[in-house]
Image: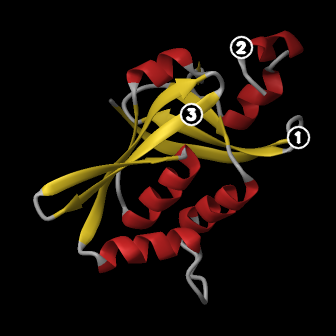
């Protein structure tokens, strides 16, 4: 497993979908994952540390986990089938660990609220639409320099 952090959150105008960019902590590979608008909004709220008057869905999930005396220990984007990514949320309750199947976007939104680390499996990095930024390059600059034929390796 490779620890990841959120490198960016953007809107893909071609697919009309938000994209989250996960970057390996001790490396340069970046994995884009297209997500739903509600999950993107929830992730953005968590990234900005905004307090909402009432709990949103991912806040509610975090509160339920806490209410059950459990904790999120990590989330792992663990598999890709076709162009669909899968993730697992790891919960610790007492001495037992429970793995829960979830979408990566929901897993990330919950991890951010729980201060839990995010990981990607090596197979996801090898088989997904990963790319590497050049030294000093930003995500914005990377996409501005892409040519149409470069999109052949990405599943938009």
Which is in the foreground here, disc 2 or disc 3?
A: 3
Name the one closer to the observer, 155 or 151: 155
Which sits earlier in the primary sequence, circle 1 or circle 3? 1
> Percent position (x, y) of residue 83?
66, 26
Screen quadrant of the N terminus? top left
Quarter of the image with the C terminus in it: top right
Residue 66 percent location from the top left of the image = 32, 75
Q: Which residue: 56% across, 23% down?
A: 135
Which is nearer the N-term, disc 2 or disc 3? Answer: 3
The residue nearer to you, when weighing 40 against 50, is: 40
- Could you say whether the residue bearing mark 2 is in a helix, strand or loop? helix
1 vs 3, front mark: 3
Residue carrying label 2? 153
17, above or below 59, in the image = above
Q: CA distance from mark 2 to mark 3?
A: 16 Å
Q: Is residue 19 visible in this depiction of the protein?
A: yes
Secondary structure at badge 3 equals: strand
Mark 1 vs mark 3, CA separation in Å: 21 Å
Instruction: Return the disc, 1 or 2, that comes first in the chain's sequence.
Output: 1
Rendered image quadrant of residue 91: bottom left
Q: Is residue 93 left or right of residue 154?
A: left
Camera sees residue 132: no
Task: Provide the secondary structure element on which disc 1 rests.
Answer: loop
Label 3 neighbour load within 10 Å: few <14, some 14-19, many 20+? some
| Residue underneath mark 3 | 85
């Amino acid at each position: 497993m490779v620890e990841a952090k959120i490198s960016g959150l953007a809107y893909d105008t071609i697919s009309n979908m938000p994209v989250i960019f996960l970057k390996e902590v001790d490396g340069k590979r970046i994995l884009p994952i297209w997500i739903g608008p509600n999950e993107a909004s929830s992730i953005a709220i968590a990234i900005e540390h905004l307090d909402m008057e009432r709990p949103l869905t991912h806040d509610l999930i975090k509160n339920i986990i806490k209410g059950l005396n459990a904790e999120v220990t990590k989330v792992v984007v663990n598999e890709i089938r076709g162009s669909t990514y899968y993730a697992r949320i790891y919960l610790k309750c007492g001495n037992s660990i429970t793995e829960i199947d979830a979408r990566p976007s929901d897993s990330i939104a919950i991890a951010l609220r729980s201060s839990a680390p995010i990981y990607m499996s090596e197979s996801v990095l090898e088989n997904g639409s990963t790319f590497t930024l050049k030294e000093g390059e930003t995500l914005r600059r990377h996409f501005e320099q892409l040519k149409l034929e470069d999109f052949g390796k990405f599943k938009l």
